[in-house]
Amino acid sequence: MRITMRTNLAIRTLMFCAVNPDVTVRKSDIAVACNASENHLAQVIRTLGQHGFIDATRGRHGGIQLMRDPAEINIGGVFRIFEADLPFAECFSKSNTCPLVDACWLRNAIGDAVDAFYNSLDKVLLSDLVTGNDALAALLRFHAPPRCRGSGREAAIPPTESATASAA
């Protein structure tokens, strides 16, 4: 079985948001970290928002945040949302033209395999994928670019601890 790019991006987006729980992230941040097209990501973000997984606010001060606790996001449910309209094989399609459909037992075997696949994913929560996964966190941790102040030409450099201590 091969998952679609949309499903893959949905899981990556949710993991990115879960690794950065206190940050409103931008679509471009996710695209860079996950090596994804912003156009494809926009479609995925829209669907995740429609299903209540994330809050996506447009505009200059907009961004994306998880709407649910990662321990409440079931990976099987996410897969079903993004894979629901895609038949696994022709015999599952509404436009099935296979002449063997009435006599073939493969459909039942494939159906059982797909059910087992989803049942396995139903046991996985988003928190299972990110909690304690330091390697993933290192790859997805958001690092905000320095903000500009004043005329916007000079970057704001946050004071170091030693500079703050010596000033006190």
Image (tube, rainbow, N blue to C red):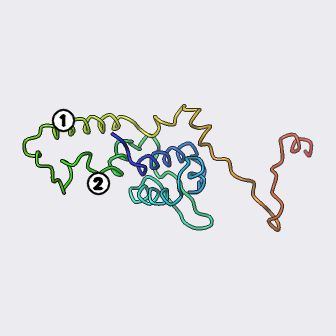
Q: Nearer the viewer, residue 153 or 57?
A: 153
Q: Nearer the viewer, residue 21 or 34?
A: 34
- Seen at 82% across and 52% down, the residue is 157
Name the element at disc 1. helix
Q: CA distance from mark 1 to mark 2?
A: 20 Å
| Residue type, label 2 | Asp
Against 19, is 93 above or below? below
113 vs 8, left or right, is: left
Q: Position of residue 83 (x, y in %)?
A: 33, 49
Q: Nearer the viewer, residue 112 or 145?
A: 112
Residue named by callout 1: 109
- Seen at 46% across and 42% down, the residue is 70
The N terminus sits in image quarter: top left
Q: Position of residue 113 (x, y in %)?
A: 24, 35
> Hey, which quadrant is residue 71 in on the image?
top left
- Seen at 21% across and 49% down, the residue is 90
Tally the numbered discs.
Answer: 2
Q: Which mark is residue 85?
A: 2
How packed mark 2 is, by other alpha carbons closer than 10 Å (few <14, some 14-19, many 20 or more), is few
- Seen at 41% across and 43% down, the residue is 72
> Hey, which quadrant is residue 109 in on the image?
top left
Q: Which mark is residue 157?
A: none
